[in-house]
Amino acid sequence: MKIGIIGAGNMGTGLGKFWAKNGHKLMFSYSRSPEKLKAAAESVGLGVQVGTPSEAVQFADVVVLSIAWAAVEDALQQAGSLDGKIVFSCVNALLPDMSGLAVGTTTSAAEEIAKLIPKARLVEAMPLFAEVLHAPSQQLSGQTPSVFYCGDDTEAKAIVADLLRETGCDPIDAGPLRNARYIEPAGMLLVQLAYAQQMGPVAMKLLH
Ligand SMILES: NC(=O)c1ccc[n+]([C@@H]2O[C@H](COP(=O)([O-])OP(=O)(O)OC[C@H]3O[C@@H](n4cnc5c(N)ncnc54)[C@H](OP(=O)(O)O)[C@@H]3O)[C@@H](O)[C@H]2O)c1
């Protein structure tokens, strides 16, 4: 599969390294520094290309949005048309100082993104923390963590679930895109536990 990644920071590279290892073709895009983008691609290796956001969209079967909330509008403008594309967003609407969420419980980053790209086949998930993705093992307390994903397009969700599984988690279908308004605050809880409560890398496990 060809995966165009918009935002090659901790999350973009953390996810990308699994997919590149598994034989997917990647293109990284969207940085304020061409050198940083090139270094991100080289850190993953395995022939990862770099391009502009619109080149990444043209290239991709699946477009990944892994950018800061504040950069979403600009990145989507640079991306061009996403009509009909599978778009996997892992954007949480974190305030820049991580003290809270800009939106949540009545809407979500994903639902706001859907308004900007209404014809994209949007799926959202809050993947494992980047620290966990970049660690030698993604297991915590000897267990495979759960990652919740949601969306309104069944086929797109199945494709994103397979990509998530490749990153060392157990993907859980959390229903329609609207449920992103609950998934994102749960991500914020993990941020609080990891940093404010100083628990270090944490993740969730669904028991039922
Ligand atoms: N990290 C995690 O564990 C985690 C977990 C769940 C969800 N998320 C979500 O994933 C998204 C990406 O997080 P991250 O940790 O990968 O962040 P990050 O390391 O800061 O990466 C953000 C990326 O966006 C690019 N970017 C370009 N223009 C930007 C601008 N104007 N402002 C900010 N960034 C800009 C950055 O490139 P340059 O800096 O090179 O310009 C960088 O490649 C966020 O929405 C976050 O909430 C992260």
Image: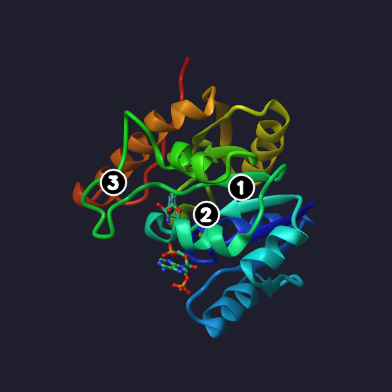
Name the foreground residue: 143 vs 130.
130
Marked residue nearer the N-terminal end (1 or 3): 3
| Amino acid type at image mark 1 | Thr
**Circles 2, 1 touching at the beta carbon (< 8 Å):** yes
Up/down of 172 relative to 2, above or below: above
Assign ligand 1 to one image quadrant. Answer: bottom left
Up/down of 149 relative to 11, above or below: above
Name which residue lies at 58% across and 80% down. Answer: 39
Give the left or right position of residue 55, taking residue 125 as reference: right
Give the left or right position of residue 32, taking residue 1 as reference: left
In the displayed image of the protein, which residue is found farthest to the top? 208
Count of numbered marks: 3
Circle 2 is placed at which residue position? 133
Cβ of mark 2 under 8 Å from ligand 1: the answer is: yes
Q: How is the image coloured?
A: rainbow
Alpha carbons under labels 1 and 3: distance apart: 27 Å
Alpha carbons under labels 2 and 1: distance apart: 7 Å
| Amino acid type at image mark 3 | Ala
Q: Position of residue 203 (x, y in %)?
A: 41, 40
Q: Position of residue 45 (x, y in %)?
A: 69, 73
Name which residue lies at 37% across and 33% down. Answer: 107
In the displayed image of the protein, which residue is found farthest to the bottom? 35
Circle 1 is placed at which residue position? 167
Circle 3 is placed at which residue position? 102
Mark 2 surroundings: few (<14), some (14-19) or many (≥20) residues within 10 A: many
Give the left or right position of residue 82, taking residue 137 as reference: right
